[in-house]
Image (spheres, rainbow, N blue to C red):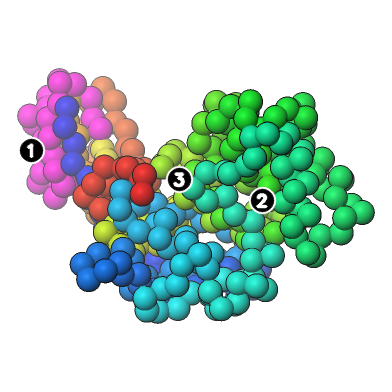
Amino acid sequence: MSTSTAVRAPRTTATRQHDVADGREPAVVTRGLSKRYGRDRLAVDGLDLVVPAGSVFGFLGPNGSGKTTTIRMLMGLIAPTSGTAAVLGGPMPGAAGTVLPRVGALIEGPAHYGFMTGRENLARLDAADRTADPRTRAARIDEALARVGLTAARDKKARAYSLGMKQRLGLASALLRPRDLLVLDEPTNGLDPQGMREIRALIRSLAADGTTVFLSSHLLDEIEQVCTHAAVMSRGRLITQGTVDDLRAAVRGRLVVETPDAGRAALVLADLKAVSVQTTPTGVEAELGDLAPDVACAALVRADVRVRSFTTKGGSLEDAFVALTGEGFDVAD
C-alpha cells in the first residue's frame, strides 16, 4: 500500500522560541549565521536559530545540511562568514574564553589516549581546567564515571574500550563539571539498546536539573523520545523549528479504514474533501486534512459502508522531516 504525506505550514517561528517557561534567556541565538567555503560552497545560509534554556533540543538534517558546521561555529571552532551567534549570552567566537567553561561538548566522537585508563583520561582533562579544584578531582571523576555506567571499567585502558564505552567516556568528559549547556553529537552511537536507554535517561535528568541539551542525532526515534524542541536543516538553511509536538502536529494525520466496500468508502471520503484518498488491500486510507474523524465515520455509516475498523494515525517526526525536506534521513555530515 502506498501513502503520501502532506505538511501544513510550520506553526512556530524563531520569535516564539523566546517564550521560555522559566524566564531565562535562550541558551543559543543565531541571527543570519552563514559560513561559506571558497566561492561556491555555502555550508550554512542565514541561520536564525533559537534554543530555549532548559530544553532538550534536537538538531536534524540530511547529509550536507550544515549541522556540523553550525555546531563548530557555536563552539567557536570556526568563525562565521557573516551573521552572529550567541551562546549562553556571549557572542561567539569572541566570548569563547568565558562561555566554554560553562559548556560540555561531545562533537564528532570522543578522542582519548588509548594508553591511559578511563579514569586517567578524565584526570588529565580535569587538570587542564584552570577553574577546577584539584582537591575534589577524584570525587568529580568518580561521579562522572558513575553517571555514564563506567565505574567497573574505570581502570581499563581506553584502547580496550568498545565503541559504546568510548562514547560513554566522552560523555563523562563533558560531565566533569556542572554545565549550563551540553552539546552532544550522536551521543548513543555504538551503544546497545540498554545503553541507549540509559543515556536517554541521563539526558532527561540533566534537563530536569536545568541544563540545556543540544542534541544532534541521526535517530529520529531518539529525538522523539527525549527532545522537547527540534530544528530541521536542509541544504544549509533552517526549514523549521519548534516544539517536537508542534512539528508532529504540522503533519496531517491519516485515516485508515478496514472495509470490504473500499470503492464506495473512497468516494465518500473524496466527497468530504479528504486528501490523497487511496484504496488498499484491506480498505481505504486518506489524509484527513481539515476533516474531523467523527464526521468521516458518520458519513461512511450513512452511505452503508461496512466499517470493520476505523483508526486515525497522527503524524510522526519522521513524516514531518520527510515532508519538510523531501529527503530521506542521512545526517552523516
Question: Image check: 214 left or right of 198?
Answer: left
- Residue in the image at 57% along x and 50% along y: 106
Q: Which numbered disc, 3 or 1, marks the residue that appears first in the sequence?
A: 3
Give the quadrant of the N terminus. Answer: top left
Hey, what amino acid is under mark 1?
Leu
Depth order, front residue of 277/147: 147
Depth order, front residue of 258/66: 66
- Viewer-side label of 3, 1: 3
Disc 1: which residue: 267
Disc 2: which residue: 174
- Residue in the image at 76% along x and 32% along y: 154
User: Farthest residue in the front direction?
Assistant: 115
Range shown magenta: 256-282
Disc 3: which residue: 217
Q: CA distance from mark 3 to mark 1?
A: 42 Å
Question: Image check: 69 left or right of 202?
Answer: left
Magenta span includes 281: yes
Occupied quadrant, residue 280:
top left
Label 2 residue SS: helix
Q: CA distance from mark 1 to mark 2?
A: 58 Å
Magenta span includes 52: no
Residue 215: x %, y % from top left: 51, 51
Residue 235: x %, y % from top left: 26, 59
Occupied quadrant, residue 237:
bottom left
